[in-house]
Amino acid sequence: MKKLDKNKLALAIAAPLLAVVAAVLITSLIILATGDDPLLAYQVMLEFGSKSDSQVWIIDKSITYYLSALAVAIGFRMNLFNIGVDGQYRIAAFFAAVVGGALTLPGFLQIPVIILVAMTVGALWAGIAGLLKVTRGVSEVITTIMLNFTAGSLIGYFLQEGRLAEKDGNIFHTPNIPESSHFFTFPTTPDPVDGFIVIAVLVGAVYWFVLNRTRFGFDLRAVGSSQSAAEASGVSVKRMVLTSMVLSGAAAGLVGMPTLLGDSYNYGNDFPTGIGFTGIALALLGRNHAVGMAFAALLWGFLDRTGSQLEIEGFAQEIVEVMKGVIVLSVVIAYELVRRYGLRKQQREVGAELAAQSAGDGTNDKAGVSA
């Protein structure tokens, strides 16, 4: 047993180590190919990223990234590809902003109402794809992609003066949320840290607990491993698919809340987009693990923050995006290689044990015959 534990630990360390070495090596070769010094690039990134204001920026940015990764990971754990997190969080944030701008409740009541509206809208929007999959067999990849465009069109229709928005210069946005409903911040220096980090940590803890310590989480992972086996054991696959899509959409509804409640205080045509697609990369990078995705979100925030400084220092502006792609590919490939190696090693060990057992049985049989 101790030997098996050591093997598992070695494999667990080997995968991320191999991914890091491969990512650094490939990225360095790409930087060299552009005529720049990779060591200087890494030095610039580390120095700029270690500044206090950069650290606060990275933490705040990683909150939305982490929530997006969680939303994607819920579907990934049962082999559902929710490509629609981008549309789900945008339409959720839009209607939450509309409700928040129309209400004048005390902050301790209005903030939960805004968050619940966002989660409900996100859950309903994702539930459309889940319902189509269980009733008509339509791939969730197709429906969620189409729903992304539908969400954007719906927001564009209502985000006009005289409908649900007002004009402010060249920007159309929903009425501002009252100041009493702005989310709290931690008084750090030089800039405050967004208090929504508390919600992100709680959601991550709930995600881990439900998946690893409840019957629902076991059923969800069982369906992801083998639908036929799960159904044979009494699990309703259709119910699990629909429930997982709804939960994924509810988590997606939280993605826009740090921006809405802590930065913009309204939804306008300058509201950030594309975070849902970033969540796909981070879920892959973090291996759908609550802690792994947190580190992946921090890494992405670090790359976003330091990328601008690299451009100022004269490096190619695309180099950070290249780094991101190389990191994701390196992690996916490294973990797959280590997984296959672990399976082959386990098969060899089992084969050796069976061969030894067969040899022992044969010796005993011969001894019995001689007697």
Image (cartoon, grey):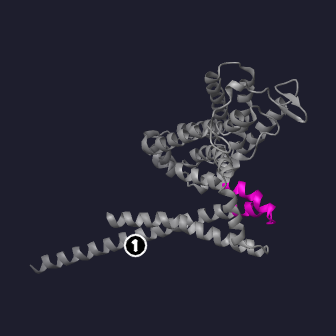
Query: Which of the image's four quarters has the N terminus?
Result: bottom left
Closest to the observer: 241 or 275? 275
Foreground of the two, 82 or 170: 170
Q: In the current view of this chain or complex, which residue is farthest to the left?
A: 371
Q: Residue 153 vs residue 65: left or right?
A: right
Residue extent of the magenta highlight: 302-323
Task: Please indicate, yes or no, whether residue 87 appears anywhere in the rendered image.
Answer: yes
Indicate left or right for 19 with 225 as reference.
Answer: right
Location of residue 265 in the rendering, given as x and y in whole percent from the top left corner:
74, 32
Q: Residues within 10 Å of mark 1 (few under 14, many from 20)?
A: few
Q: Is residue 231 visible?
A: no
Residue 86 % position (x, y): 71, 43
Question: At which x and y percent is residue 345?
Answer: 43, 71
Residue located 43% across and 63% down the image: 9
Q: Which residue is mark 1?
A: 348
Q: Main secondary structure of the magenta part?
A: helix
The residue depicted at 68 percent of the width and 30 percent of the height is: 182
Specify the amino acid type for callout 1: Arg
Q: Which picture quadrant has residue 238?
A: top right
Quarter holding the C terminus is bottom left
Residue 155 magenta:
no
Q: Is 164 on the left-hand or right-hand side of 196? A: right
342 lies above or below 284:
below
Place of residue 157 in the rendered image (x, y in percent of width and height, measured from the top left): 84, 31
